[in-house]
């Protein structure tokens, strides 16, 4: 089993015919994802050949869903149009919208998150690598060959690159699902959402949670783990050497005074029984120790 994404998932790509959309559509198809269509009003009614697979292009998400029964949309849409694209996916009844785009204004993210939640659409991102259930499906930009075989570790991470590193470090064990939730100040799916899903997944034995400086998401996740998670959790928090008041990488990764520091997050997680690594490689060793 996996969370949010499985072998039966039918995926459409909003912005498929753009350069980034085409590149990653090709990679998703190669990793076994069932891509059933793309969306571009200017190219509606055409088909695109992607390495021998003919993919239809629809004029709207609603048309694509009606024709294909799609239940996942991956959005490769510029920041200025991302809000409208998520709203369109939600209006069409798409259950899962994976928003890859970086640089979306915070007020747009606030608006489309609330709109999607009201209509039962889960948003992953924005500013994220998407999610993958190895051997089953891949929705986003995560390279499937890092950890090609399924396993029993669940991974949730704010950071795309740290997602990739932990997948590589633990590739011999494998993952049920890996979810990159994004590092913006406002995101659609949180650590807690993924922790709850992994807790309910019978084929996930251990959860890896990657956080970073800024905000209080990790502290809130620690409280949730303490009260609701029975499976072992191993964590890592990026940003121990980050200077105060300087944004580091992600828009949400900023320490203000004593708030949001890596040390405070590590202490909160450890108080909830989470083993926290000092480095990504050290975190992988903690996972191996726990599983062995």
Image (spheres, helix red, strand yellow):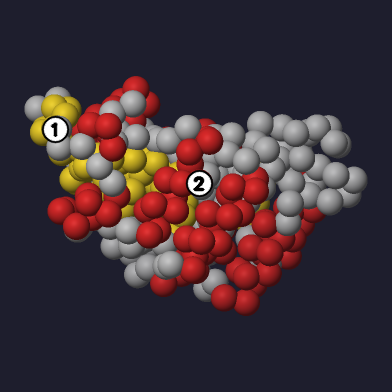
Quadrant showing the N terminus: bottom left
**Vertical order, 217 against 18 (above or below):** below
Residue at 38 percent across and 59 percent down: it is: 91
- Element type where label 2 sits in the image: helix
Residue at the far right: name it: 257
Q: Which mark is residue 235?
A: none
Who is closer to the viewer here, 96 or 175?
A: 96
Q: Answer left or right for 214 relative to 201.
A: right
Mark 2 Cα within 10 Å, few/some/many (few <14, many 20+)?
many
Query: Would residue 222 be seen by someone viewing this image from the given angle?
Result: yes
Residue 156 visible? The answer is no
Q: Nearer the viewer, residue 72 or 267?
A: 72
In the picture, the quarter occupied by the C terminus is: bottom left
Q: Is residue 72 left or right of residue 244?
A: left
Compared to residue 220, the image places residue 101 above or below, namely above
In this figure, which residue is indicated by the disc labeled 2? 83
The residue shown at (85%, 44%) is 256
Q: Residues within 10 Å of mark 1 (few under 14, many from 20)?
A: some
Q: Which of pointers 1 and 2 lies earlier in the amino acid sequence? A: 1
- Could you tell whether 191 is left or right of 81 in the image? right
x and y percentages locating residue 89 in the rendered image: 37, 53
Compare residues 146 and 191 and report the one nearer the observer: 191
In this view, the residue farthest toward the bottom is 227
Horizontal and vertical percent position of residue 162: 54, 37
| Residue 155 image point, x, y percent | 47, 51
The image quadrant of residue 62 is bottom left
Q: CA distance from mark 1 to mark 2?
A: 26 Å
Q: Residue at the location (62% across, 77% down)?
A: 227
244 versus 152 height, above or below: above
How far across and down, in percent of the image, does residue 77 sit? Answer: 43, 35
The local secondary structure at tag 1 comes to strand
Name the disc covering residue 47, or none: 1
């Amino acid at each position: 089993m996996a969370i949010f994404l499985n072998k039966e998932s039918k995926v459409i790509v909003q912005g498929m015919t753009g350069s980034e959309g085409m590149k990653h559509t090709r990679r998703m198809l190669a990793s076994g994802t069932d891509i059933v269509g793309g969306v571009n009003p200017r190219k509606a009614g055409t088909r695109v050949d992607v390495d021998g697979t003919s993919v239809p292009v629809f004029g709207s998400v609603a048309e694509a869903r009606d024709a294909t029964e799609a239940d996942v949309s991956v959005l490769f849409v510029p920041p200025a149009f991302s809000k409208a694209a998520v709203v369109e996916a939600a209006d069409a009844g798409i259950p899962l919208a994976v928003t890859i785009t970086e640089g979306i204004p915070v007020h747009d993210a606030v608006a489309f998150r609330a709109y999607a939640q009201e209509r039962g659409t889960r948003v992953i991102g924005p500013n994220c690598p998407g999610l993958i259930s190895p051997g089953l499906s891949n929705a986003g930009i995560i390279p499937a060959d890092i950890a090609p075989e399924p396993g029993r570790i669940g991974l949730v991470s704010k950071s795309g690159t740290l997602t990739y590193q932990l997948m590589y470090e633990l590739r011999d064990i494998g993952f049920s699902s890996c979810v990159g939730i994004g590092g913006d100040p406002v995101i659609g799916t949180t650590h807690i959402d993924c922790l709850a899903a992994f807790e309910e997944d019978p084929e996930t034995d251990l959860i890896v949670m990657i956080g970073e400086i800024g905000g209080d998401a990790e502290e809130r996740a620690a409280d949730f783990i303490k009260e609701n998670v029975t499976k072992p959790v191993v964590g890592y928090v990026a940003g121990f050497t980050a200077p105060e008041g300087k944004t580091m990488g992600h828009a949400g990764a900023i320490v203000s005074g004593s708030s949001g520091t890596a040390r405070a997050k590590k202490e909160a997680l450890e108080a909830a029984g989470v083993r926290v690594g000092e480095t990504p490689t050290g975190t992988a060793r903690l996972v191996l120790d726990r599983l062995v």
